[in-house]
Amino acid sequence: DGDDVLLAVRGVSKSFGGIKAVQAAELVVRRGTIHAVIGPNGAGKTTVANLVTGVYGIDSGEITFDGRRIDGRRTHAIVRAGVARTFQTPLLFTHASATENVLAGFPDTGRLPLVRAWLKDPGQYRRTRELQDRAAALLELVGLGGDGHVEAGSLPYGKQRALEIARALASDPRLLILDEPAAGLNTAETAELGRLMLTLRAQGLAMVVVEHHMDLVTQVSDEVTCMESGAVLAHGTAAEVLAEPAVVEAYLGVE
Ligand code: ATP
């Protein structure tokens, strides 16, 4: 792979019992680019995200991140290597504040009882202040500047999705995997999400976005991979992929 390759999924397969969820999949994400993964329901898109993040082990093939094998590693090690993700349905600490949710995303602080650490060690207190400031900056970045104190579960759905992104960014990733980030968002929120993704890309962050919302895919993606029945059906720019007869067919086939 060239130096510009950040993530490479090569010939990866995964079955669940008799279901071949992913079959010899290829996904190459270049540094600082947005790569959309599209395809009908059940195509294997989320499973690819789960394989890259170590939720499941792969049956065959290999996955490299920044030139190093990450298949077979545990999720926390993959996060430490620089991969973060959000989920199809937000998984927030609903009874904690937005700020606390972001704090939980910082590596090695999730389990840290902050107040106790501060009483014991003034150094930890400084560190806690720093983390609070970084959490505030991340909330600001995703449009939640005024919501730090709000209980996550009582935020409107669109803001919960933005909060998930802020929490994922807390691990300071080089690759962010977004699983259907526009699902459940209204038009204005989807446009906002698109702008946020372009801002993050301008800061050098690479993204994989699993998405059904084609306007968003067309707006943000540098490359698109279309999957069907676990396999890659087409790869190229959004315009190229969406013009492929096989891709049109795959989408019409599920109507
Ligand atoms: P959607 O757009 O609906 O989210 P998808 O492209 O993300 O679909 P996957 O969720 O990856 O598709 O599912 C691919 C196939 O693998 C489906 O047939 C699904 O039922 C199956 N599958 C995924 N995860 C598991 C699992 N943990 N156990 C059993 N089958 C699974």
Image: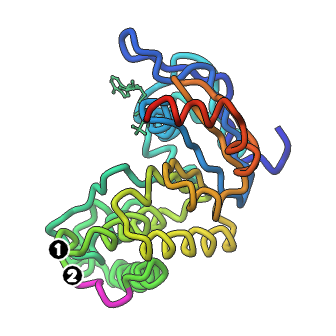
Q: Quick check: which quadrant has ligand 1? A: top left
Question: Residue 169, how many percent across, how many down?
Answer: 48, 66
Q: Is residue 245 above or below residue 61?
A: below
Residue kind at label 1, given as amino acid type: Ser
Q: Quadrant of residue 206?
A: bottom right
Q: Is residue 61 magenta?
A: no
Please report the residue visible at 44 percent of the width from the left and 85 percent of the height from the top.
140
Question: Which residue appears farthest toward the bottom when viewing the image?
Answer: 146
Quarter of the image where the C terminus is located: top left
Q: Nearer the viewer, residue 125 or 142?
A: 142
Q: What element carries label 2?
A: loop
Q: Mark 2 — residue? A: 150
Q: Is residue 229 above or below residue 132?
A: above
Q: Is residue 110 visible?
A: yes
Q: Main secondary structure of the magenta part?
A: loop
Q: In this view, does 229 lie above or below 36?
A: above
**Mark 2 nearby-residue class (10 Å; few <14, some 14–19, many ≥20):** some
Question: Residue 182, how many percent across, how many down?
Answer: 43, 60
Q: Mark 1 — residue? A: 154
**Mark 1 nearby-residue class (10 Å; few <14, some 14–19, many ≥20):** few
Question: Residue 107, how many percent across, how many down?
Answer: 42, 60
Q: Does the magenta stretch include residue 146?
A: yes
Question: Residue 214, how many percent across, how many down?
Answer: 56, 54
Q: Give the range drawn in magenta.
A: 145-149
**Image side of residue 4 versus residue 107, left or right:** right
Q: Nearer the viewer, residue 111 or 84?
A: 84
Q: Which of 244 and 16 is in front in this view?
A: 244
Q: What element carries label 1?
A: helix
